[in-house]
Image: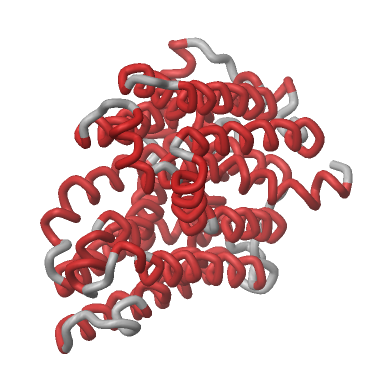
Amino acid sequence: MPERQSRHLPLLLAGVSMLAPFAIDTYLPAFHAMEAGLDASALQLQQTLSVYLAAFAFMLLFHGALSDAYGRRTVMLVNLVLFTFASIGCAFSHSIHVFLCWRVLQGFSGGAGLVVGRAIIRDLHEGPAAQRMMSQVTMWFSLAPAIAPMIGGALAVNQGWPAIFWFMAAVGVLLFALAQVWLPETLPAEGRQVFRPRPLLSSYVQVLGDRRFLLLCLALAGNFSGFFLYIASAPAFVGTLLHQPETRYAWLFVPGIGGVSLGAWWSGRVARRWTRSQAVQVGYWVMSAAALSNLLLNWCTVPMLPWAVLPIMLYTTGMSLAAPALSLTLLDLFPHHRGMAASLQNFTATVLNAVVAGLLSPLLSGNGLHLAFGMAVLVLAGFIACRAMHPHLVLEADMQPGTA
């Protein structure tokens, strides 16, 4: 791959991965304005988020398999076009029912970058190089949840809510143009799989029937859900427990996202010196220290700033340190179905996040100690899954530092 392509590829992959959080977080500050503009109720506006997430989760099952069959570049470019048209459709919508239809198309196309990007990284690199690139993508991608609400709020106040979706369309056009120049096809024709129902079903059964794959999915999903519990509980955590107004949500998101960036940077720095299992072990030590300190703080005191958010930052640092090594090990289990493996891993994480948001958060968010306990249980589940996988992780990844 040309040097210029290689230099810019992490930024491009982070950009296409950002489409998913942009499509969720950017328009949330405009809900009240959209109720009037679309003549919709608050419940109907909430459904625009639900239908997006449902379509997003459904297509997570297929983005990877499609890229295994038709190539990474083709699937990425097609989905960028679909996302751009869906965003334009949202901007032109004058009724909630039309808007809902375009949101479904946004959901179908918004997750391709998350899935296909990981497969591209592993197609191109192995060992330390793959871990460094995945860490770079994570560092850039982690900015999306922090900046999306600010961009959306500014556009809604100054230009009106349709400007948010014109912004998404512009991002889609920009990424499509950059992908034409910077995005290589990393899966040659001879390495592609047949996209037909019977072989596809057989491949899904093969992947899902692998105990190692399921354990790694659980480890990754459990680790992230320990942080996502606080994201889903943000209104109660920031408003009720920390007694901060709606404008102070940065007290949660900035430390959390800052930890993600710090952990990703750390992972890239140690990629050549540590084995994958060492990176994972240190990551779990950091997450465990964060969960334990969170429990002790909430047991001994009422939640207050800045102490209540420091364990969250420490937690996301450890989570992001361990994630690249776990993700690459998962992809290495199925070298001929990396796209499918990435799809199923993302789908598993999305399902667990839905359970956390719909069940755990309502049960735990009213009490700081309960939230801390929920974080500890989730990271413990991830740790148990990782320990059950550990012998395979050593055999397959630790013959020399950073290699598969």
Q: Nearer the viewer, residue 344 or 385?
A: 344
Q: Residue at x 65, y 44 (%)?
A: 13
Colour scheme of this structure image?
secondary structure
Q: Residue at x 35, y 64 (%)?
A: 247
Residue 303: percent from the left, percent from the top?
A: 21, 80
Residue 206: percent from the left, percent from the top?
A: 42, 29
Q: Is residue 303 above or below residue 147?
A: below
Residue 184: percent from the left, percent from the top?
A: 77, 34
- Is residue 138 visible to us here? yes
Q: Is residue 147 above or below residue 156?
A: below
Q: Residue at x 12, y 65 (%)?
A: 366
Q: Is residue 230 left or right of residue 30?
A: left
Q: Nearer the viewer, residue 392 or 182?
A: 182
Residue 139: percent from the left, percent from the top?
A: 59, 60
Q: Residue furthest bottom?
A: 300
> Which quadrant would residue 36 be assigned to in this image?
top left
Q: Is residue 365 above or below residue 337?
A: below
